Amino acid sequence: MFLDEVRIEVVAGKGGDGVVHFRREKYVPRGGPDGGDGGRGGHVVLRVRRTMHALSWFRQKRSFLAEAGRNGGSSNKAGRQGKDLVLPVPPGTLVRTERDGEVLADLTEDGDEVLVARGGRGGRGNARFANSRRQTPRLAERGEPGEGRRLQLELRLLADVGIIGAPNAGKSTLLAALTDARPKIADYPFTTLQPNLGVAGLEDGRHLILADIPGLIEGAHTGAGLGDSFLRHIRRTRALIHLLNGLSVDPVGDMDRVNQELAAYDTVLAGKPQVVVVNKMDDPQVRLRLPEWKKALESHGIRPLFASAREGTNLQALLQAAASVAERAKEEPVQETIPVHRPPTDPSVFRVAREVDGAWRVSGRNVERAAAMTYWEHDEAVRRFQRSLARTGIEDALRQAGVRSGDTVRIGEYELEWED
């Protein structure tokens, strides 16, 4: 089943822990600290794979975790970095954050990639804390937790020409006749439940990528029928083949309604050049009404083509016309980004609050990160963390808030007991 929109969760790898270790060799009675650093955790990267045409790869799995970095070792051995997790996506994937809808990347070309979650920094070993005053540090850092994000992936098909029209106009039949694509074809509306892609060859050797868009009905831009789910796929096309059903009671009215839905969804779509084609000319009833349809369309300033997708009549002329219109079409202008001024997020900012059970909660990026990287089993590491609380003003903030001896203070996933 075609999947063109999906929400996933990505978590980068945790950094490896630094270690506390001292050199122990024969004839070296006072070996110094030689604990190595942990390795960086693996990043999570989205990369375009041109052979993919949908997001169906994400159907069975929505959560992804990159490899953690290895811990450091003795003799100043650094831990190995975690392998980056590369997730393949099809060309035309728009990557947004789920929380605020911010666009992180628009991946269109084969090999395009974006780093969506950064691996945690490896913790430092005790060799990194040695100095002239502290020659035997029993102190190291745990690895930093990897970054986590919830993302929304939205696919917008990359095609030169989109085939649009009312339901049962013969769009899938036309795509099958022009390309090697094999969409579902049947004699009832809404046969096509997903967009289909195909490559059509012209007599002069050129190629066109065609997209068959499911039928649009009145109210499609608000979600009626199937149009709301697939109108986004027309956004990237350079031109449109507007296919009219010659057996319809009012093909011109069908065309107007479809164009109104395009304009209501996105004004850019309404401005895309169109090749208007009356289909099903193999039917005698359509041929009888040919002068009527031609006159009605020309009164709208449209010079239509007439074809039969079933019998293959006039299809090369249709392709040539579509190719010419697509080549003349201007590239879609890059929309100017409206600057949004947001106050910069200072990682040193923290907040102290009282929780329902009476415990105190200290939240803030830097303090939570420091707590996660602290070796609580080493007294020297605990004292270092306490000094950081005093230096950053967190101790004073807790006292002003009314903390008392014996109270529980939570920082991240850790619970501490306050002592004055």
Image (cartoon, rainbow, N blue to C red):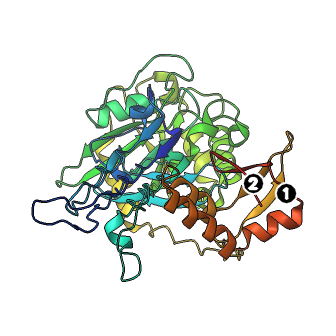
Real-space Cα separation, disc 1 to disc 2, in angstroms? 8 Å
What amino acid is at disc 1?
Answer: Val
Secondary structure of residue under mark 1:
loop
Q: Which residue is drawn at 73% across and 68% down?
A: 394
Q: Residue furthest left?
A: 27
Q: Which of 223 and 417 is in front in this view?
A: 417
Image quarter (top left, top right, bottom left or bottom right) of the C terminus = bottom right
Answer with the quarter of the image where residue 296 lies. Answer: top right
Find disc 1 in the rendering and name its residue. 403
Find disc 2 in the rendering and name its residue. 418
**Do the residues bearing badges 1 and 2 touch, measured as CB atoms within 8 Å?**
yes
Left or right placement of residue 370 versus residue 180 in this view: right
| Image x and y of residue 43, in percent | 37, 54
Q: In this view, does 329 lie above or below 55?
A: below
Q: Which of 345 and 17 is in front in this view?
A: 17
Q: Residues within 10 Å of mark 2 (few under 14, many from 20)?
A: some
What amino acid is at disc 2?
Answer: Trp
Image quarter (top left, top right, bottom left or bottom right) of the N terminus = top left
